[in-house]
Each structure stands twice: as structure tokens, then as C-alpha cells.
Amino acid sequence: MKNFTMHGRRAAVYTGGKDFDPALPCLVFVHGALNDHSVWTLLARWFAHHGHAVLAPDLPGHGRSEGPPPGSVEAAADWVLALLDAAGVRQAAIAGHSMGSLIALEAAARAPERITRLVMIGSAYPMKVSPALLATARERPLAAIEMVTRFSTSTLAAKPSYPGPGMWLHGSTRALMRRTLQGGGGIDGCNLFEHDFRVCDAYAGGMEAAAKRLCPATLVVGRADQMTPPRATKELATALNASIVTLDAGHNLMAEQPEGVLAALRKACSAS
Amino acid sequence: MAGYSDPAFDTLALHAGAAPDPATGARAVPLHLSTSFVFQDSEHAASLFNMERSGHVYSRLSNPTNAVLEERVAALEGGVGAIAVASGQAALHLAIATLAAAGSHIVASSALYGGSQNLLAYTLPRFGIQTSFVSPLDVDAWREAIRPNTRLLFGETLGNPGLEVLDVPRLAAIAHEHGLPLLVDSTFTTPWLMKPLEHGADLVLHSATKFLCGHGTVIGGVLVDGGSFDWAAAHERFGRYPELAEPYGGFHGMVFSDESTVGAFLLRARREGLRDFGACMSPHTAWLILQGIETLPLRMARHVGNTRKLVQFLAAHPKVSRVGHPELESHPSHALAQALLPRGCGSVFSFELDGGRAQGRAFIEALQLFSHLANVGDCRSLVIHPASTTHSRMDDAALAAAGVGPGTIRLSVGLEDADDLIADLERAFKAAEKVA
């Protein structure tokens, strides 16, 4: 992990197992709610070892980055753009998963001249969270983690497992969310699960952002996604004039279909 | 999949990690007896070797059949993943070798399986790893035994030979207070009776040879990671576990805790431990253990049911001076067993036959259904007389120190009809009575 200092706080960033070289084409990976950089490591390693500079940050208050967590998608997008500044990167492609996909979209809108490709994985707009799930995340976050784990995984046998053979994806999905929840967003009394869900739920700038961004967009959709079902991307896909890649997966696309997501990203990054 | 949580235990025992084979439609788990797996092209090969992609390369490191077993045991234990290895001993060695080095220290229960005790007391000191043994019943002693160079706490869910119940929640709390993980050998209980990870343990191992396989056919071990221990935080705070939190020269400078927040231990154990020590499991073995696990819930219920009947019979028998089973109020772990093992305390236990070594031998030799051998957890009932076998070189005083009497008989209760087993024991009691 490479540590940057952003607004006086530590930002921990995975760089794909290689030293970060800002002279190379840059690809930024933005994780989703109650996750961290480790949902990206296979993809990040691949791109880092195939001619790219990779930034897969732990968002503030997540993983090893100091809090507080961003209070909105817009604030998170500003943080990502500030990370590019801190890393000495002028332009970058950006991929985001779930909440991270909204952050990527908003970043592409706020700095259309800097974002060269946009890949939204497991996305929806609006990304409304059901009142029942919000309430469970607030009152019984461990129970909400069970629900989201179940809703995010479409199979009991995702092969070849992520990040390697022998991993049980239901267990690793659950454990990562529990670990991130324990971190408490880096501030006392924070329920990071509810916080992240509210950030997703409150985001209202998606269509405006789609109109502002200039780069080509790709949506990667899980056919069996129960968190952000394919139908929830249609309006956004139209607004973005996006290429759509549909994979046999649930919401946990990078873990269930790492090869499919890699192929989609390679295509998106090579498209002119 | 409907519902708000994972499928139940019985469903996971049949389905976790496996789906109909996409190439052939085979419904049962295919047995992949292949040492190696073809690369799509040179780039694919390079990216597999560099962990940019997930997949199988060589069966010492991973194999599709083994992977099903690993995912299934992880699912049943509530872990993030697992590694199947050649034996339970190999699982213990892999866990220690991943976390410890010369100069490290372990705190372990004094009531361990003999093989584990040998490894810790005699073999690992040659490699610079010391162990302090403490009573599983004395929680304070565990805390007091921790040193600055301690790297691991280790115990068995049920101690050997007295079936002391490990106080997993309290020991896990002590371990975590000191920035240490708790490793638990859950061989005797299986996840059907206890899931140590749910009680705070960080790592679990099994001799899969026993109940997981359940048929006395193959030797194997499984090491499960709960994904709960924060290796990077322990390294930042105490400087421990550089194996997981600093660049590893043996694998492209990889920092395993960067690669996987919750799976760092398993990545290192596989990428180094399986690669270098090589104690991998044969896919054939994995396949047979999977067959066993499919019926684990059914078998464990029957094991426990039969055991309760035999414990009741023996506790009331005039020729038995003591039955050591935690479900009896006389057992020192009775209260803890009720809290941690509500479904039962397994099917391996000892009782004390009135008389000495000669009566013990006569008892064993008169049994017809119980097989006299050195194993447990078979579907068939097993028996051994420690004073004339595993502990035969000890005098009576040494036996007593080891918690074994001259008339101690250890049973592993199988799946036969309980009345037939009781009749077999009754026949043996009569034979022992005839010995002067």
C-alpha cells in the first residue's frame, strides 16, 4: 500500500503490487459501501503489470484510510480527484463498483477533461436503499451484513474463487464488511454501513453527471444482481450511451466473475 | 437463492463450493486427478503465476476437487476460506509455519493429541520455536504464559484424554487483548457441534481423517481462516507477523495483507507453505472426504445419540468407577459444555474399568463390534486401551500424571445400533471379570 496525505489524513492506496509511476496511463478503482481496496486486487495487479499506473484507494474511513468517511457521493468524488492531484496524475480512467460507481460517475462529471474512461460495475441510478435495509443497517448492522452477503452473491460455487482457489466468497464478503464496520469510519460512534447506504440513497445528481461527463462509458451488469438489478441501470445506460456488458453473476461481480470483469475493463480501456 | 442469510448447515454440507460441472453436467463433484492445468496462452500463464488471475496451475498448490472441499469446510465453519493438506498434523504445521519463525513462542493447551504435543514439545524447539503448555481449564495461566515473542494460542475444543472443553470465548478475548490469534483444533467436535470462529477463534484446523471423512478411509487435514484477525494492525502495533504484512521476497515482494484484507493468512499459507513444504492433499482424498461431509449432519447426530446411550449405560455399570464425559455433571467442564456444545460433546470418551492393565486387556480382547485400533471418528465403533498401547511404556504414576489409569478404556462410538454396542460392552465386562 502506498500512503498519501490528503487534507492532513492518511489515504492508503493499493497500487497493484508495483511502484506507482504517474507517467503511465492511470486507472483508478473505487470500491463500494463497507468495502475496501481488496475487492480489486486481481484486476489492479493485472493492469499494474500490463502498462498501467493503478490507484485502488481505501476511501476515507474505510480500510486503512483515516476518516471521516465522505458525507456524499459528491464529496467522495472530490476526494478521488484530489487523490489524482496528490499522485501527480493529470488524466485517468476510472472504474467503480456499486457506491463506488456513483463516485466514479460524479468524478467524471466534475472533471470531464481528466477522466478518460468510465466503467460502472454493479451500478444503479437512482441507487435507492430500501427503508427496511436502512433500518436494519442502523439497528442491527451484523444482520444487515448477512442480508447483503446473501443478496450480493448469486451462487454457492463461484469458480475459480477470489482472490484464489479455496476461498469461500460468502465468508470473505461477510468478513470484509464486518472488518470495515469495526473500523467505524475512523470516527467515534459512526455506523459506517448506515452511513454508506445513506450516501448511495441520497445521491440525486446522476443524470446531470451523465450529461456532463465527456468520456466513453461502460456498464458491467450482473444478470442475477439483487442489489442493483439490471433493470435499474437502463435509464442511466441511455443517458451515458454506454456499452453494456452482462455477466452471469450477482452484485459481487469482481469476485464471482473476475475474468469477465477483466475482459470488460480491458475492452473499455482499449476503446478509442 | 431466497432468504436473508446463507443456507443452513445441512444444505451447505451438500452444496457449498460445488455446482453441476459446466463441461459435462456431472452432478456429483468431479474427481480431478490431474497434476497440472493447461494455460490459455503465455500471458495467461504469466498472470496466473503473478496472482493477477485466479486459477489452478499445479495440484500441489491447488486443485479443483480440493477447492470444493476447502470452500465447503470454510462454509460449514463460517470462515473465509480453507486449505486442504495431507493430514491434521500438516494443518497444524502449516498454521505455525505461516505465523512463526525461529525465536517465536506459542502458548498451547497441555491436553493435546499426542502428535500435536510431540510437534510442539520436541520437534519445533529444534527449529527455534518454543511452546508453553498450560491447563485448558486455567484461563489465567494462558494470560500469564504470553510473552512478547508469542505468536499464537492453540488448543483443542475437547482436550485429550479428559475432554476438557476449551473456553474459546475467554481465550479468544485474552488472545485479542494481546494482539494474538487463537487457533483451535476442532477435530473431535466438527462444525456440527461447535463453530469456534463464531466464539471468537481466528483459525480452525481439522484432522479430516476423523469425523469429516467419517469412514476411516483416508488421511487428511483442513486449515480454515475466519478472516477476523487483523494482521496488518498487529504488525503496525506490535511489529508482529512480518510474514503477512511486509514484502515477501519469495513471491515478487508481495505484501499479503495488502492483497487480501481478510484472506492474507491463507494466501501466504498456500503460496509459501504448500509450495515449499509440499504437504498437499491428494484430490482422491479430497473427494472421499467430500463424500463424508455430505452426510456429516446425519452421522454426527447418530454419533452423539449413540454416545449418550453408552455413557448412560457405563455410568450406571458396577464395574465402572468413572466415566469422563462433559455431559455428566461430574465432569469439570460440564457447565461450559452446556454453553458451548449444546448439541453434544462428540463420540470419543474414556471410562475407568475396575481393575488393572490385565483386566483392561481382557476387556478389549473380548469386544467383537468395537475394533481395537488407534483412530477415532470412524462410522464403526473403535476402542483402545492406552495402558497397553499408546502409553504402555509408562508406569502407573506416569499414567496418572497423563490422566490415564491402568483400566482406562477409550471409545470412539460409531453408528451401529446402540443396543448391539451395549451388548458388546457387557460381554467384555464379563470377560474382564474372569481375569484374576
Image: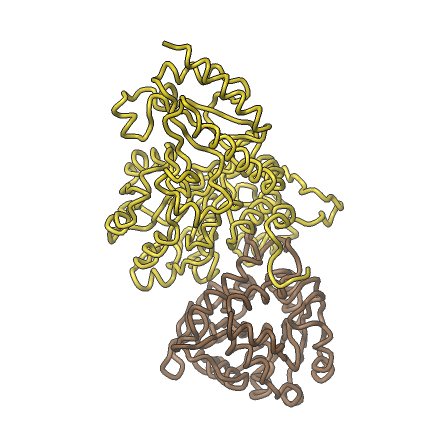
x and y percent of residue A78 in the render?
A: 50, 85
Q: Residue at x 35, y 52 (%)?
A: B171
**In the figure, B29 relative to A76: above or below?**
above
Can residue A226 be seen? Answer: yes
Given the current orientation, which residue lies at the most extreme right position? B25
Relative horizontal placement of residue B315, taking residue B294 as reference (left or right)? left
Q: Chain A: what color?
A: brown
In which image quadrant can residue A134 be found?
bottom right
Of residues A247 and A42, which is closer to you in this image?
A: A247
Of residues B290 and B98, which is closer to you in this image?
A: B290
Q: Quarter holding the C terminus of chain B?
A: top left
Of residues A9 and B400, which is closer to you in this image?
A: B400
Task: Give the colour scheme shown.
Answer: by chain
- Chain that appears yellow: B
x and y percent of residue B35 in the render?
A: 59, 39
Q: Quarter holding the N terminus of chain B?
A: bottom right
Q: Residue at x 58, y 40 (%)?
A: B296
Q: Residue at x 48, y 53 (%)?
A: B267
**In the figure, A47 relative to B264: above or below?**
below
x and y percent of residue A217 in the render?
A: 67, 78
